[in-house]
Amino acid sequence: MQSHSRVVGGAELNQISQQHYYERDPKRIYYLSLEFYMGRTLQNTMVNLGLQNACDEAIYQLGLDLEELEEIEEDAGLGNGGLGRLAACFLDSMATLGLAAYGYGIRYEFGIFNQRIVDGWQVEEADDWLRYGNPWEKARPEYMLPVHFYGRVEHTPEGVKWIDTQVVLAMPYDTPVPGYKNNTVNTMRLWSAKAPNDFNLQEFNMGDYIEAVLDRNLAENISRVLYPNDNFFEGKELRLKQEYFVVAATLQDIIRRFKSSKFGCRDPVRTCFETFPDKVAIQLNDTHPALSIPELMRILVDVEKVDWDKAWEITKRTCAYTNHTVLPEALERWPVSMFEKLLPRHLEIIYALNQMHLDHVAALYPGDIDRLRRMSVIEEGDCKRINMAHLCVIGSHAVNGVARIHSDIVRNSVFKDFYELEPEKFQNKTNGITPRRWLLLCNPGLADIIAEKIGEGFITDLSQLKKLLEFIDNETFIRDVAKVKQENKLKFATYLEEQYKVKINPMSMFDVQVKRIHEYKRQLLNCLHAITLYNRIRCNPSKSFVPRTIMIGGKAAPGYHMAKMIIKLITSIGEVINNDPYVGDKLKVIFLENYRVSLAEKVIPAADLSQQISTAGTEASGTGNMKFMVNGALTIGTMDGANVEMAEEAGEENLFIFGMRVEDVEALDRKGYNAREYYESLPELRQAIDQISSGFFSPRDPGCFKDVVNMLMHHDRFKVFADYEAYIKCQGQVDQLFMDPREWTRKVIRNIACSGRAGCSPGVNVDHIPGTPL
C-alpha cells in the first residue's frame, strides 16, 4: 500500500485499512471489553505515524510548544486498572502486527473519577472527559443498532420469540488505532446508548409528553458512567444492562460484517454459519462480556434457525475467555431473579446449556453429586445465582490465565474440575505492554540510547533488547543510562513542584508504588517500611542514610472503606515525616494524586525502585511491573504474577525478591495465620503498629486508624505481618546496592535487556492475542 505524505484524518485512515481487510477477507479478531483505558491519543498517533519530529517542528514554527499542547488533552479514562489498560495495549499491538482486529466496548460519558486529596482523604470528582468534545472519534449513525431488554418469551411452532421488549439504540463511535509505521489503522468501536424517538410515548397517551421525553434519560443512562470497582463484583442491574448492551450491539455488528464480505456492501452474501469460527474470533476480556455466549446462541438458534447442537459447536469454536483474577469477591455471580426480569430468553438458554453440560459430567462421573454442584453454571442457595466464569469456561474453546503462576492456579484450583474434564482448553498467555507507549513515547531519552547501540528493531520486537547484554560493562553506556534516569528524575521533580507544590530531593532514591489501592496489593506493607525507616532516622539522626522519596499513588473504589483508610494513612504518615526537621532530606513520603495513564507516563521513567509486593498468589499478572522494568527501575517484589517470569528472565539475583511463595502462603493458611505472633516478636513492627494505633500519625483524631489496626491484627487475609521482616531486610539490600551507582546501573541494564521475552512467548512484548491462533 502507498504511504501517505500528508496527515490524513482518522476516518480517512480507517477507510484505507478497512478496505484492505475487506479485500483480503481475513479471520477477524473481536476483543470485547467493558474497559479500554486508553489515556491520551495525540502523541501516540504521532509516534505510530512517524510524524513526531515533523509535528514538533511545525508547531515550533507557529510559536507553540508541542508538550504544552499535549498536556491539554484529557485522558480517555474508560478503565479501572490493569484489565482496561491491557485491552488498550492489545489494540496497539494487534494494529502493529497488521491483524484484522477490532476493540468493542462502551463509550462512557464519565470515565474513572478524578481523585482529589482533601485533608488527606480521597474525594471523587466526575470525569467529564467529553466536555469539550473528542476529536479522535467519529459517530457512525448509519450503523446504529437496537438492543432489547425485559419482555417475555413465547414458544411457537415457528420457533422461540422474545417479545414485548424495551428497545435502546446503540450508536457506534469509531476511534482509529494506528499500527507502528505499517500503514495499518484498526478501529475501536464504542457504543453509546440512545433512546428511540417513540421511547415511553406510547405509555403517556394521557398527554404527559414532557415526562416521557425526560424519561429518555433512563435508557441513555446505560452508557453514562464506568463502574469504578477494580477486582470487586457489585451486582447492580445497571451494570448487567451495560454488559448485555455492549454484547448485543457488537454481535449484531460482527454478524453483519460476516455476512457481507465485499467492502462497502451491506447486502448479506453469506447465509451459512458453518464457516463462522474460521472468520470470527471473539476474545472475552474477563467474564464481563460473558453474555456473548448465550447471545450468540440466541441469534443462531432463534433468528438464523441453526440447529441447537450445531449452534453450540459454532459458539464454542468462536469464543475464548481470559480470566483476570482468582479473588472470590471479584467473580461475577448474577442473581437468577435479575436475569428472569431483564433477559428472560438468555436465562432459558443458560439453563439449557447448563443441563447439557451437567448431563455430560454426570455420564463421566456417575454418582458424584458434589462434582455436579461444584461445576454447575447455576449456584443453588437462598438466592440462585449464575456463575459467569463457569459459563465462560463451558462456552469457550480456550481459557487463559495472564501469567504462568496465575494459569497454574486457574488449572489447579479455581477451575480444577473443568481442567480435569478438558485439560486441552487451558492455556497461559502472560500479559504484556506495548513498547510504543511505554518506552518510545514516555522515555524517548532511553529509547534513543538503546537505538544508538542496537538499532530500532526492538520497537516492534522487544526480544532484540537482549543485544544490550553486550554493553553491560560498557562504561559509556552505563554512564548514558544513569544520565537519562537522572534527567527523568529532575523532570518529574519539576513537575511535582509545579503541579502539587511538593519539593523533593532529585538525588534521593525514587521508590514508587503506583496501582489501584487494594488490601491484596499491600500498600500497608510499604507504609510499615516508611514508618520503620522514620523511626531508625529519629533514633539515630547523625547516622548516614540512603535518602529516599517514597511515592505511592492510586485510586480507591468509592465504596471500599479500607482502601480509603489506607490513603488517609499514607497521607498522614507523609504529613508527620515530611515536616519533621530531624528527617530533612533523608526521607519523604508523597501520595501521587489522581494516578492515571498520563501520570504513569511521567512517573515510571523517573523511578529507581518499583514495588510489586502483593501476597503470593493474589496478583494475576501485573503489567506496571513490566513498565518499570523496561524503563530502568529495579523491582522489589514477591514471587507473584509476572514477577516470577521477570525474575526468571533477568535472574533472581537482579531483582529484590522477598517473602512467602504460594506454597508458604498455603502452608500458613493450613497452620493458621496469627498476626499477634509477629507483633510480639518483632520490636520494630510493634513500634510502628503502636504508633498508628495511638494516634501518633493522627494527633487530632487518635482513633482514626483503629479499623486498619484491627484488620491487620485480627483479620488480614493478605498476611502483611508475615512478610514484614523479609521485606525490611530486602529493603536494606536495596539501600546497599543504591550506594554503588555503577553496580545498580549494570543491574538496570540487565533488567532492560531481559524485559522482552524471546521467541513466541509474549512476556513484555505482548504483540499477541490470547486464545487466537495467529
Image (cartoon, rainbow, N blue to C red):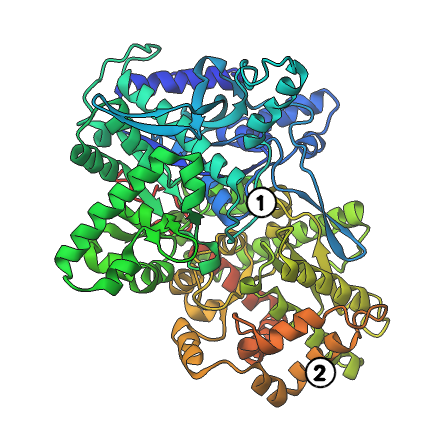
Q: Is residue 86 above or below residue 706?
A: above
The disc, 2 or 1, on the residue closer to the chain's N-terminal end is 1
- Identity of the amino acid at label 1? Asn
- Indicate left or right for 324 with 553 as reference: left
- Indicate left or right for 632 with 246 as reference: right
Name the spot of residue 462 as percent of width and height, x first: 41, 46
Q: Residue at x 56, y 49 (%)?
A: 229
Determine which residue is flagged by label 1: 443
Q: Is residue 404 above or below residue 665?
A: above
Q: Residue at x 76, y 68 (%)?
A: 704
Q: Residue at x 23, y 47 (%)?
A: 355
Foreground: disc 2 or disc 1 = 2
Q: Residue at x 42, y 52 (%)?
A: 324
- Identity of the amino acid at label 2? Gln
Name the spot of residue 276 as percent of width and height, x first: 23, 28
* Residue nearest the viewer, comparing 630 with 313: 313
Label 2 sits on a secondary structure element that is helix
- Indicate left or right for 13 with 280 as reference: right
Q: Quadrant of the C terminus?
A: top left
Label 1 sits on a secondary structure element that is loop
Residue 682 location, quadrant? bottom right
Q: Is residue 1 visible?
A: no
Residue 303 location, quadrant? top left
Number of the label disc, if any, that sits on residue 184: none
* Residue nearest the viewer, comparing 11 with 765: 11
Determine which residue is flagged by label 2: 687
Q: Is residue 81 visible?
A: yes
